[in-house]
Amino acid sequence: MTTFSLTHRFRPSRREARPAARRLRPWYQNRSLVAGLVIVCIMVLLAVLAPVLAPYNPIKQNLNEALQGPSGAHWLGTDKLGRDVLSRLLYGARVDLRIGFLAVIIPFVVGTILGAIAGYFGGWLDIIIMRIVDVFYAFPLFLLVIALVFVLGPGESSIYLAIALVSWVSYCKIVRGEVIVARQQEYVQAARLGGLNNARVLGRHIGPNVISQAITYAMSDIVMDIMVIVTLGYLGLGITPPTAEWGSMIADAQEFITTLWWMAVVPGVAVVITGLGLSLIGDGLTDLLSPERRK
Amino acid sequence: MLSRLKFVPMRLLQAVPVAFGVTLVVFFMVHLIPGNPAESILGAQATPAKVAALTDQMGLNQPVVQQYWHFLSNLAHGNLGESYTYQVPVLTLVWQRAPVTLLLVAYSVVLMLIISIPLSMLAASRPGHVRDHAVRVIPLVGLGMPQFWVGVMLLLVFAVGTGWFPVGGYGDTMMDHLWYLFLPALTLAISISPVIIRSLRASMLNVLESDYVATARSKGAGGRSLFAGHVLRNAIIPAVSIVGVNLGYLVGGTLVIEKVFAIPGLGSMLIESIFARDFPSVQAVALFVAVFVVLVGVLTDVVYTLLDPRVDLTQRMNA
């Protein structure tokens, strides 16, 4: 006779839990997801291959060739210091995408853990965590990030820290809500009645079922992080010059907007395309991971 | 369910710890400065005597709890310190700049509604239709546009290109203000509209499925009169709360947009103070804006419940 194991994972069987649509359509038939992945992969490839693709050194000045229009030698012209705009655009992708993708990690982890704790245990832990969340919500994102980058000093590490301090709250709110719902579900009750400890119930049973919302949100959060980085760059508070960065490129170009207008347009278009790709991935993931939320 | 009479004071009471937390965050900003804040504020050329004087003035020698208490009691007396740059109380500066920013915020809310309501009606009136899809693409592109860049683009087309609007500034009379602030307000409206359109569309679809719309339809109402008389009026209520939730984002955007259009509001004050390392001014702007956002949050919640008697207050307290 087999003994019934209490540590058996109480999870709904995959087939039962998923509506028909989810089984029938594999991820590669999800148009938003594929389109988004293609766009983001192209942007990442351009960034990674920048040293190979860029025709010039992005920070090398050549004052004799400053402020030129597009030509065979400089496809997108040159800026006020004679630097090749196309090369700066490609190198800028390295900075903006790297920070955008990396900055999302800490808030994701911290927010998810705190949200799970608040939602699962409730009580005073929940109250304390959520009041802290409220406080951070009171500050507009840009205000807090700008102020934090100012006090922490210039440089990439303070951007990571500022973004982490500000954006964990969204994950916390999302995951808390999901956990509160999941806690009432039968599979969780079963796992708890089975005598599993809290950490195990949270990690092995609730976690996998609530994480999809946080992952979907992370896509729009990366877009937001890129917004933050270019905005800081535009305000002159971000990555220090002469490093190429899309936001500071737009700021530099604003001075010459009457004549060399494309210098301000192109870096913004790069941001928009990247954002579009990530939003499409987010939409696709919503369809794939939580079809019940489609509307 | 909570009674309506009790809800308002309770919601206000809930804002108290948040406001308290806001002061804590603003206070601790100084302590996030690596090393000695006084030294960092004065810069590398400062003499040790000057650093010691500022350390003393900022009360950095005292225990943290005492410093915070000092900060709070000063705050209660409306004293946020003196601007290092202008040698006047920072609160005076904030009061000078705040109306400009508030006008910009209000202006952009108006333009936002003018943009979002027709578009969301267009989308919700025929779900799944080409025009619905067209409207739903807007957020995908719109959310990826940096606000300041939208501003620069509008500047390029409507100020530099056509010369219809000024490239920056604020003007002198109220009519001037509205003319000068049009492009900045439009920038903010465009960048926040995607979120609003998405929520409005969803709430209109909800209303369209309701029994009272079915009743109206069965009585022969359709098309425009149905939308104007039944759907819009009910769908606009959740919009109040959506605007409230996104107000922080809007105010944050204003701070950045002011730099694009050289508008003398709180945002320009923030950026100027940062470059001047004028710490009390930075703190004052942060505090003012955060308290403003908290208050508007309370206000929208209250208005929301007054507008719609069906709102479940217990749920709103816990939200």
Image (spheres, helix red, strand yellow):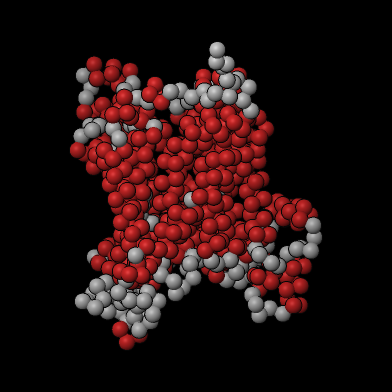
- In the rendered image, residue B74, in percent from the top left (x then y), is placed at 72, 55
What residue is shown at x 56% (from left), y 37% (from top)? A115
Which image quadrant for residue B49?
A: bottom right
B106 left or right of B209?
right
- In the rendered image, residue B243, in percent from the top left (x then y), is placed at 43, 41
Question: From this viewpoint, is residue B145 visible?
Answer: yes
The correct choice, above or below, for A129 with respect to A264 in the image is: above
Specify the farthest residue to the bottom.
A64
Viewport quadrant of the N terminus of chain B = top right
A80 left or right of B79?
left
What residue is shown at x 25% (from left), y 67% (from top)? B161
Nearer to the camera, B239 or A56: A56
The correct choice, above or below, for B204 with respect to B261 in the image is: above
Viewport quadrant of the C terminus of chain B = top right
Which image quadrant for residue A162?
A: bottom right
The correct choice, above or below, for A12 with respect to B101 in the image is: above
What residue is shown at x 49% (from left), y 29% (from top)? B305
Nearer to the camera, A21 or A252: A21
Nearer to the camera, B201 or B213: B201
Specify the farthest residue to the front.
A1
What residue is shown at x 63% (from left), y 65% (from top)? B279
Specify the farthest residue to the top.
A1
- In the rendered image, residue A233, in percent from the top left (x then y), is placed at 45, 65
B8 left or right of B47?
left
The correct choice, above or below, for B57 with respect to A111 in the image is: below
Question: From this viewpoint, is residue B139 visible?
Answer: no
- In the rendered image, residue A100, in percent from the top left (x then y), is placed at 44, 56
